[in-house]
Image (cartoon, rainbow, N blue to C red):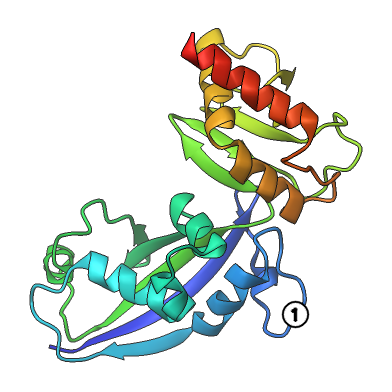
Amino acid sequence: MNYLFYITVHVYAEEKIDDRVLVLHSKNYGIVGKDIIAPLRKINGKEYNIKNVQDTYKVKELWDWIDFKLYGNSLRAEHNDIIDFVQEYNIVEKYLIFNNLRYTIEDTNKPLLYYLHKMGISETEKINIQLLVSSDAGTIFKDDGIRYYIHSKESGKHNTPHVHVDIRHEVSGSFSLIDGSQLSGDGIKKNDVNRIRIMIKSKQKELIEYWNEHTDGLTVDLSSPKIMFYLSMSLILSRN
């Protein structure tokens, strides 16, 4: 069996489509950066044939194939910061398009053919795939209904490295990446504050690396005495 795929890429910022970073040869790569956007430019608007696959060909295999088209042998590296970042925070979301509607595939271990038949699509037809990328909005990840994001223009704000949070579209605020203290946001429930602080503590290294690489704020040195003191105190408190 042969499959014909057509891939489109869209970038969204502040929950709106903004494809300016996908313009070929542009030096504007947005907050996501060149390493992620450049491969997406190459795959955007292209048709691909996958030949001689079995009826059991899974959606997961298709998603893995797309990842390989984007990042090649880098996927096989034991450690690659870009790949780790893309995979851990699901920066590139993949969808199937049927009848101009975008569908999330919850069970990627099911055969692609299962979903084609479910939507009344023949395996001989061109299959549309859409990749959605979070860019200038600075979304890093979502967890338990809380969206964590960092703006690219942070110079002069709060005077400390921080992450913004949006809690189930009900309330928002910001928290220090150094010690987890709340910098802004009235009405955040105590349970959510604790949850956010635990997340910052567990992801502090990644969050500060993202801050350093993608904002115009002050660069943070993870080995500085202040941060090391905070990490040590957190470790001591967690043991008690």
User: Could you tell me the amino acid type at mark 1?
Assistant: Ser
Q: Quadrant of residue 213?
A: bottom right
Count up the numbered dots.
1
Residue furthest out toward the right: 156
> Is disc 1 surrounded by few (<14), some (14 to 19) or many (20+) residues within 10 Å?
few
Which quadrant of the figure has residue 47? bottom left
Which residue is nearer to you in this view: 53 or 9?
53
Q: Please name the residue shown 49% across and 8% down the image.
A: 240
| SS label for mark 1 | loop
Q: Position of residue 109 (x, y in %)?
A: 17, 59
> In the image, 79: left or right of 129?
right
Residue at figure coordinates x 49%, y 58% from the top left: 84
Residue 170 seen in render: no
Residue 181 appears at what percent x and percent y? 70, 19
Q: In the image shown, does 1 or 207 lie closer to the viewer?
A: 207
Q: Position of residue 228 (x, y in %)?
A: 70, 30
Where does residue 201 sit, x and y in percent of width and height?
A: 57, 28
Look at the image and tell me whether residue 186 can be seen.
yes
60 or 221: which is nearer to us?
221
**Relative side of 183 to 73, left or right:** right
Q: Nearer the viewer, residue 218 or 146?
A: 218
- Residue in view at x 64 percent, y 26 percent: 231
Quadrant of the image containing the N terminus: bottom left
Side of 88 where 95 appears, left or right: left
- In this view, 208 is above or below 126: above
> Which residue is identified by label 1?
26
Residue 235 location, quadrant: top right
203 relative to 192, above or below:
below
Q: Residue at position x 14%, y 61% from top?
A: 110
